[in-house]
Structures are given as C-alpha cells and as structure tokens.
Image (cartoon, helix red, strand yellow):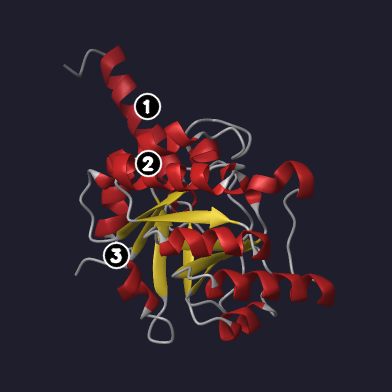
Amino acid sequence: MKSTTRSLRALKGVRPIVCLTAYDVSTARIADAGGADLILVGDSLGNAVLGLPDTVGVTLDMMIHHSAAVVRAKTEALVVGDLPFGLAHDSFPKLLGYCRRFLQEGGVKAVKIEGGASLAPAIARLVDAGIPIMGHVGMLPQRVHSAGYRRRGLTPEDQQKILIDAQAVAAAGAFAMVVECVDETFMPKITEAVSVPTIGIGSGRGCDGQILVIHDLLGLTPEPPPFVRPEANLHRDAVAAVRRWAAKVRTKKSK
C-alpha cells in the first residue's frame, strides 16, 4: 500500500517506521523493494554521490534533479525532498517558492527542513499553504561550519533546547521529524513529548523509526559513521566483480 504523510503519522506507537535515503532510480527501487516506508532524497547527496565534503554545497537545482529521478521509480514509499542549506531562512515568499518547485518539478510529496523553534512559524505557514513538512532537530549537518558534527543532548541545557525545538516543530504541523545524533538515553523523552513520529539517525532505539543513508547501509561508503552497522559490503563485491571482468578482458576471454 502506498505510504502517505497521514499513514506514516498514524504509525506512531503502532510499529517502527523504516526510512532510507535514495538519490536516483536504482537506489529508490532498492529501498522500496526492501520495504522502506519513506524515502528521503537527502542533501547527503553531496557526500554520498557528488563527492562534496559536506552538505553545504548542495543546491536546490541539484536536489530537484535527483528528486525527479527518485520519483520516476514510482515507489510505494513516500518520497520526501531535503531543503538545502540556508533556504529555510529566506523570506517566506521565496521559501514557499522553493518548496513549490520541489513538489511541482521534483515530484516529491513532502519537504524536510532542518531547524527548530525559530523556523516553527515558517513551517506553520508552509503547512497552511498545503506543503507537507518533515522536521529535523538535534544535530543539524547544514550547520557544520558553525556548530560542527557533535552529539547533542549531553547536558540538561541542551536537552531542554532540543525538546523545545521538537515540540515547536510538531506544534507547527510537521507530520514527522528526523532527530539526529541525540544522546540515546534522552531520545525516549523527545518521542514521548511530541505527537508525531520521531525518526532517529544515530540516536538509539527510543524513536518511532530509523533512517540511514542507503550507501552506508549497503557498504558503499568507505568510512561510514560509527553508529552504522552495514548489512552488506557492496563496494568490496563490486570491485571484485570489476576485477574478474577486467581479468577476462585482458586474457581475451570476454567479448
């Protein structure tokens, strides 16, 4: 059955939600056939596919290009597009335009936005305009140059800030939220405090679901994050396949 923002929101407290990133038709088909409920065309595109050092260099045009490719896979999973660096803090008319392009040109059914309480008013206006929004709190990769990559929720003060962010995003009308790299002992409190599903990445098991970068899960990433336990080693297997074929070519055993 095809997933929608409503059906995913209704899974909170019923069963864990399975989410993966995808960036093209091939990875989208793999994620969908494997049982993902939600596919995120993440700005992790920069690291996983484009060879960029972080997500900051990913543009809206890049995201729309790859989102359209994922949508062409015609998945049962809900496809969500990741709003790139800085755009959520633009004026509302421009922000609405960015999200409209995502839905109209990229074909996604929802947009993910990084940020907490300060963005809640804009999220509420987007939802009112008919743009389904997925939130993202905790560690924010788009702020790598100002905050770095660091685990969040290790102090009472930081826990309170994350809780305020999560509650504000949920109250603004987001149908779900990613919670990244938050202390796993604190994560259950966030899940209990909001009425929408929490989708964890590197935040332990106290979430309503989990999301991973598909390249990390499949063993295509040379050095995956420490919280990832790859379920395959496709990089090794692919290299071995190429070497076998190359050997056949060199010995004239392959046409």
Residue at left offset 22%, top offset 43%: 72
**Residue 7: quadrant of the picture:** bottom left
Q: Is residue 26 left or right of residue 63?
A: left
Asked if one can make out residue 43 in the rendered structure from this viewpoint, the answer is: no
Q: Which residue is mark 2?
A: 101
Question: Is residue 230 shown above or below 191?
Answer: above
Residue 244 location, x and y as percent?
A: 32, 28
- Choose the circle earlier in sequence order: 2 or 3: 3
Mark 1 vs mark 2, CA separation in Å? 43 Å
Q: For numbered disc 3, what is the local secondary structure?
A: loop
Foreground residue, 252 or 193?
193
* Quarter the C terminus occupies: top left
Question: Is residue 188 shown above or below 148?
Answer: below
* Quarter the N terminus occupies: bottom left
Q: What is the three-letter code of the residue carrying label 3? A: Gly
- Choose the circle earlier in sequence order: 1 or 3: 3
Q: Which residue is mark 1?
A: 243
Residue at left offset 71%, top offset 45%: 144
Q: Mark 1: give few (<14), some (14-19) or many (20+) Cα within 10 Å.
A: few
**Mark 1 or mark 3, whichever is nearer to me:** 3
Residue 35 location, x and y as percent?
A: 29, 65
Q: What is the three-letter code of the residue carrying label 1? A: Arg
Q: What is the three-letter code of the residue carrying label 2? A: Arg
Residue 51 location, x and y as percent?
A: 54, 30
Question: Is residue 24 shown above or below 29?
Answer: above
Mark 2 vs mark 3, CA separation in Å? 28 Å
**Mark 1 or mark 2, whichever is nearer to me:** 2
Q: Which residue is mark 3?
A: 35
Q: Is residue 93 left or right of residue 151?
A: left
